[in-house]
Image (spheres, grey):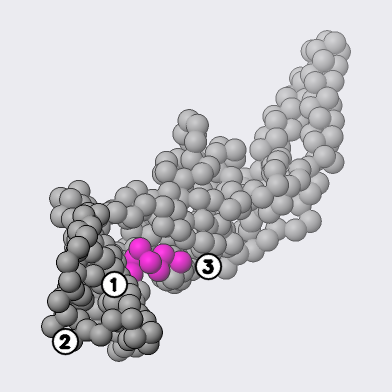
Amino acid sequence: MEEKILTGKKHGMAALFGILLLNALGIVGIVAGANMDENPVLIAGGIVVLVFATFLWAGLKVLRPQEALVLTLFGKYIGTLKGEGFYYVNPFCSSFNPAAKTKLSQSGDVGKAVSGTTDDIGNRISLKVMTLNNSRQKINDCLGNPVEIGIAVTWKIVDTAKAVFNVDNYKEFLSLQCDSALRDIVRLYPYDAAPNVDTTGDGVADEGSLRGSSEIVAGRIRDEIQKRVGEAGMEIVEARITYLAYATEIAAVMLQRQQASAIIDARKMIVDGAVGMVEMALERLSENNMVELDEERKAAMVSNLLVVLCGNRDAQPVVNSGSLY
């Protein structure tokens, strides 16, 4: 289904004046017929004109900026009205929007639901950029750890005919495709960077992760959703991760693991620094020939310095008042 834009229909004001004129003529005919000894011809003609003018009101359409109306005539798609203005179309035309009463967690779905599918106000299609705040999902990452993740998808309609006729309900269709695309992408990544994990599919292990590569993950989610909803006439502007955490049943254990990993990294840094300081101390003593130490004394000095530098508490100094040897 291809979109057809109806042009040359902005005759709403002229049609309005014509309808008002027909209403006036119908009223004048009825009144004149009643005053002329109840002339049935004039009265009947006035009634017919008045009924016909009343029927013509259905052809008046008003659109605000970034709104559209998909029009059908006896079930056949005849075109779409786009852009603000006052239009006049065939009074038999009806507007169609299957998602008019759908309520999701997204911008635009606020207020009371419209009643009836033939109401032009409720059947208007918004062409503005919309935001879908998809509900949080529990998904297993590539290591099998359950994580909870939520995304916000920014989207808009670019083809009204595809959105209305190619899918049953384009809002629900978008929401379901977001869920599916999110699962397909998240399962490729670990929550944190892990060894021997290929997240790009090139056969080479990398450091991609949900927590550390959020921009890349969001971009892949956007591209995946766009592939799925293109046939529905929608464009995905952006997808962002709004919530990311381990599932509650493993959150405490994973926190302990992160704390242990942080402690190990800190200890490694402390040991590296302490070894460097001991080496520097021995080199300085050897260069200046301040003290000649045998291997046993060097080992004792290294041991004492490492205990002092790597300890969790401040060292208690002991003053040696006797001979070094």
Secondary structure under the numbered disc 2 in the rendered image: helix
The residue drawn where x is 69% and y is 44% is 63
Q: Inspect the magenta stretch and tell me whether residue 212 lies in it.
A: yes
Between marks 2 and 1, how big is the CA–CA gap? Answer: 19 Å
Which residues lie in the magenta part?
209-215
Secondary structure under the numbered disc 1 in the rendered image: helix
Q: Position of residue 222 (x, y in %)?
A: 45, 66
Q: Quadrant of residue 45?
A: top right
Indicate which disc residue 1 carries. 3
Indicate which disc residue 295 carries. 2
Q: Quadrant of residue 18?
A: top right
When the figure is inspected, residue 250 is found, relative to residue 324, above or below; the finding is above
State the predominant SS element of the stretch in magenta.
Answer: loop
Q: Position of residue 143 (x, y in %)?
A: 19, 70
User: Label 2 is placed on what type of residue?
Assistant: Glu
When the figure is inspected, residue 267 is found, relative to residue 249, above or below; the finding is below
Q: Position of residue 202 (x, y in %)?
A: 34, 88
User: Label 1 is placed on what type of residue?
Assistant: Ala
- Neighbour class for label 2 at 10 Å: few (<14), some, many (≥20)? few
Q: Position of residue 226 (x, y in %)?
A: 46, 68
Left or right, residue 255 beside residue 43 = left
Residue labelled with disc 1: 274
Q: Name the foreground residue: 284 vs 49.
A: 284
Mark found first going from the N terminus, 1 or 3: 3
